[in-house]
Image (cartoon, rainbow, N blue to C red):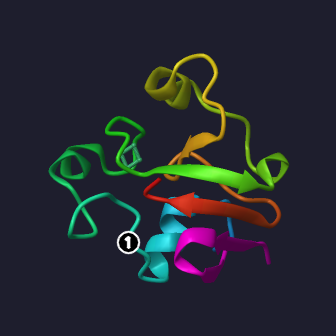
Amino acid sequence: MPTIVCENIHRKIPSLNGGATLHDSLQAEGVRVFKGAKNYCPFTLLCHGRGWCGNCTIEIVSGSENLNPVTGLERKQFGPDPGSHRLACQCAARGDVTIRIRP
Ligand code: FES
């Protein structure tokens, strides 16, 4: 089972099976993915993990090769070269990955 290491909060999270997104795996372990005081934002109420709001932005520290390719929604959010940024709701881990949440 792939592991998601959240470097900036010192947590190791098991990735959920079945192609679950990082967003789903982090939320299942109670990790606050979104910016702000609570684990949701008004935009998320509209987005529901569809890649529109950008509030689940994470930074990939290592293991990007273990993620699915950058999606069109992520290119729309970050531009043609997203660098180390991904949307947690748009990527799933096939192997271990180290990230920073709420960068
Ligand atoms: S939850 Fe809105 S872009 Fe990921």
Vertical relation: 51 (above or below) 16: above
Q: For this rendering, which residue is in front, 83 or 67?
A: 83
Asked whether the viewer can see residue 28, the reply is yes
**Residue 20: in sight, yes or no?**
no
What residue lies at 63% left-to-right and 74% top-to-bottom? 16
Count of marks overlaid on the render: 1
65 left or right of 5 in image: right
Most distant residue in the left direction? 42
**Side of 4 relative to 42 (left or right):** right
Q: Residue furthest top?
A: 80
Q: Is residue 80 left or right of residue 30?
A: right
Residue name at image x 68 percent, y 66 percent: 18
Bounds of the magenta span?
1-15
Name the image quarter holding the N terminus.
Answer: bottom right
Give 22 or 33, whichever is nearer the viewer. 33
Q: Give left or right: position of 100 versus 55.
A: right
Q: Report x, y in % for residue 15.
A: 67, 73
Which secondary structure lies at badge 1? loop
Is 8 colored magenta in this rendering? yes
Looking at the image, residue 54 lies above or below residue 96: above
Q: Position of residue 7 (x, y in %)?
A: 63, 70
Q: Nearer the viewer, residue 28 or 37?
A: 37
Crowding around mark 1 (Cα neighbors within 10 Å: few <14, some 14 to 19, many 20+) is some
Q: Amino acid at mark 1?
A: Arg
Determine which quarter of the picture holds residue 94: bottom right
Determine the residue positioned at 25% across, 62% down: 40
Say whether residue 56 is magenta: no
- In the image, residue 96 lies at what x, y percent? 80, 67
Which residue is rendered at x = 66% and y = 55% of the image?
92
Q: Quadrant of residue 80?
A: top right
Q: Position of residue 48 (x, y in %)?
A: 31, 51
Q: Which residue is mark 1?
A: 32
